[in-house]
Amino acid sequence: MTSMELRQITRDDRMAVRELCLAALDPADTVDLDYLEAVLWEAGGKSGFVAADGSGMLGVIFGTVGPDEDGTVAGAVTLLAVAEGHRRTGVGTALLQQLERRLAASGAVEMWSGGGQPRFWWPGINEADTGTVRFFGHAGYTFDDDAVNMTVDLDQADLTSAAPAGIILRRVLPSEWPAFLRWMEATWDDPWGEEVSTTLRREPVSCFVATRDGEYLGFAAYDTNRRGWFGPMGSRPEARGTGIGSALLKLCLKDYVDRGDSTCEIGWVGPFDFYTNAVGAVPGRRFLRLRKELAQ
């Protein structure tokens, strides 16, 4: 450990980080590696550090800092990966402590073990990953809440739908993005605009909208931060209960079917009953959101 170098990450580290992610993470979490890189390198309020020695990169950590839902300035761990053979040697602990210090200096008063909207890869720690849960527990993080994904069996789901009378359902056009973003920012406090902006990179664009007389009523997006996850979606209050949400959801899921997918995940679910009733979604992976107060 005395020969380990801990330093701020640079663009020159990008390829080494990519290779470390491929080697250290679950293969399911690197299928969409280009988008993972976008989350890591393009997120606002981003900080990153690497641990290295003469043999190469031993570990990497990325985190973000920004206002939480209640206005609290909070930090979040976006990624922590340590090379096989260097785990349980203090590399991960050193990286986490360095990130905590940096984000505290940026004003963060608390840290989360995942999330960091709008650009995140995991909303928390998969409860099945008991080793990572224990690691954060030993670092002083305690359970605060959870985020549950739902799973849709696309082979069994009824995806037939029709637009409510007077409503147009269509895919977002890149040319209308500035107007759509202004509407998003005026309608919701959530930073969904930045998250959904990633859908413009997908082919086809992975976001649908509902409009009436040229005005936006709702939206639904998929493959935002990572491929295979549906969300976010939302409808204006006066449009809820009209069937717009269900119709937009099914349009997105039809795109999954068209490309040959048999399942998808609905990420960080709020209204469970809606998704169950609309497409037969069932609870899937549960992510633990662990929190730690930072010393100022």
Image (cartoon, grey):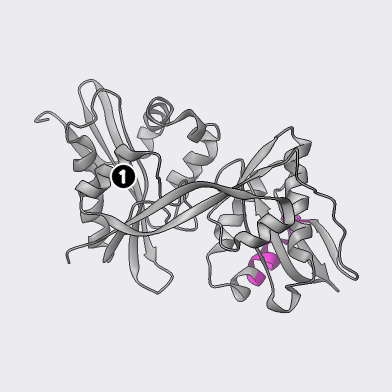
Residue plotted at (28% across, 63% down): 110
The N terminus: image quadrant: top left
Q: Where is residue 216 in the image (x, y as percent from the top left)?
A: 75, 70
Question: Start and end of the magenta stretch?
Answer: 171-183
Q: Quadrant location of residue 276?
A: bottom right
Q: Magenta stretch: dominant SS?
A: helix
Q: Which residue lies furthest to the bottom in this view?
A: 238
Residue plotted at (70% across, 68% down): 179
Q: Is mark 1 on a helix, strand or loop?
A: helix
Residue plotted at (80% across, 49% down): 159
Q: Where is residue 226 in the image (x, y as percent from the top left)?
A: 56, 43
Q: How crowded is mark 1: few (under 14 residues within 10 Å), some or many (20 or more)?
A: many
80 to the left or right of 236: left
Closest to the observer, 232 or 14: 232
158 to the left or right of 219: right
Residue 290 against residue 49 in the figure, above or below: below
Q: Position of residue 42 (x, y in %)?
A: 47, 49
Q: Residue furthest top?
A: 55
Closest to the observer, 266 or 259: 266
Q: Name the residue under label 1.
A: 133
